[in-house]
Image: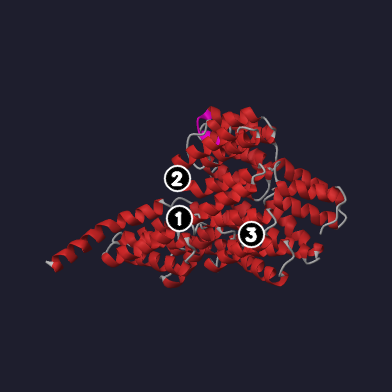
Amino acid sequence: MAALQYGAAADLDQALWPRAVAVATLGLQPDLALAGAGRWSHADPGALESHRLAADAALDLHDIPVAEREYRFVVTNSADGTASELSRLEKTLRGADNIYGARQVADRLAKNLPASAAISRLQGFTALRADDPATAAVDFAAVLAAGDGADPDGEVKRASRRARVLAGDVDASLAESLADVKNDPSVSNRFDYAVLLWSAKRDASAREQLESLLTDAQARADALRVLGLMAYDVGDDATAEVRFTELLGTGAYTDDAFYYLGLIADRHADIERALRSYARIQDGDKLVPAMLRAADILYLHGEEAQADELLDRLLVDQTGHAPEIIAARADLYAQAGHPDLALGLLNEAVLQYPVNVDLRYARATLDEQLGHVDAALQELEALLRARPQDPAAMNALGYTLADHSRQLKRARELIERAYGEAPKSAAIRDSLGWLYYRQGRPEAALPMLEGAFADEPGGDIGAHLGEVLWKLDQRSEAERVWTEARRIEHDNRLLESTRQRLTSGESRQ
């Protein structure tokens, strides 16, 4: 009788583990999901899905060895075959939130699996996402050398050219794309060439190509969307507004159009119009950021109850984005002069989601803003211990140390390690430039910050570049950079405080 009871319990466990792992995954508890998937695979060694979910959870935790081992088990044991499973894995890693971790998993898989075009594709796309276009270009070249069968839809060819442009091989890549247009002036070839020109920062030529596509019904929506994004990115709001309004008329990309129309109205303090635009977004990846910005507007204009109601509803409807929503709510409270309320909210959230990096970074940022520098550094040190190979964790700690002129040697080691992993990351190049400045080397800082600002001309990088220029007595250029950065990110607090401090004649402590 005892043996029968044990067998029944084992069957019950085997049936319940998939649900337990699903609950942990949906509850944003990757540590629990990983443990549950391990128990599931122990109870049912043939359950391939247990290994797949274990790998996903390990990737969320940046436990790269475990993630790679579990993904490799799936790839080598799938009844669908290795090629099919690698194709599925490519989609997973290209969509993973942990961009740097996905790249590291792909590289480890390449060391432990036989070489193939599918593996090179995996490495190329993950390296490109992880801000290492030069390495991605090498990987894509290996795919293309395998023949057309490895790139049936031309996606690798397009990605290869973009990677080469980002890595500095601009003219040859553009020449190849233009040759395709001359050989076959199809809409797709012309559009690909225009987008590549945009990647190469040949904006005038890109616009000319895209505008020539506006009369083509097949290409009009895509061309309008890119034209709108180009104008928005450089702060040309009048043109961007026209393009996104025209995009609405096509019936395509409506959520994108409303989102950017909302941001444009927001930039110009047209609050009612911004809120109306955000409210028209129905779904997709723009929904949560739009609602968070709407809550921000409401809260900062005295409608605290409405803002809280909106955030409460968003938490119910978008449970998968709970940490992001909570972090945004805490930032609202801090901006409104309630730092204790904000910190309490984050402390509670970290207890609920103890391994969520976004919440941990948010708490460290708030502690730093409140002057609790030691607490912020302790948080970032703990994150780096948990994720020792994560370039984002290296960069966050290194930058914070540098910004407060602490342990500059260690700060440099951390940032340079992160830079080695992601040499085209604007955020990491900004950190490295700022470190040089903190070391008293503004001349060394300048080219690093100029390159970062050219790629991402936002508030934080603009604040840093402007300060270095100011230090080098290039004050008119500093003012130009600050003005450009403010046009793009009008409410950046670091930008405003830096400009005010320096132009008012205050000395840096």
Residue at 50% x, 30% y is 251
Check residue 30 for magenta coloring. no
In whole angstroms, how far apart are the C-alphas of marks 3 and 2? Answer: 33 Å
In whole angstroms, how far apart are the C-alphas of marks 3 and 1? Answer: 26 Å
| Amino acid type assigned to the residue bearing label 3 in the image | Lys
**Labels 1 & 2 near each other (Cβ < 8 A):** no
Reading the image, the residue beneath label 3 is 424
Relative to 8, say whether 287 is above or below: above
Reading the image, the residue beneath label 2 is 319
Image quadrant containing the N terminus: bottom left
Instruction: Point out the frontmost of discs 3 and 2.
Output: 2
Reading the image, the residue beneath label 1 is 151
Q: What residue occupies the far left of the structure in this picture?
A: 1
Residue at 65% x, 43% y is 206
Percent x, y of residue 165: 63, 55
Looking at the rendering, the stretch of residues picked out in magenta corresponds to 250-257
Q: Is residue 408 left or right of residue 129?
A: right
Instruction: Point out the frontmost of discs 1 and 2.
Output: 2
In the rendered structure, which disc, 1 or 2, sits on the residue that comes first in sequence? 1
The answer to which quarter of the image holds residue 431 is: bottom right
Percent x, y of residue 119: 44, 64
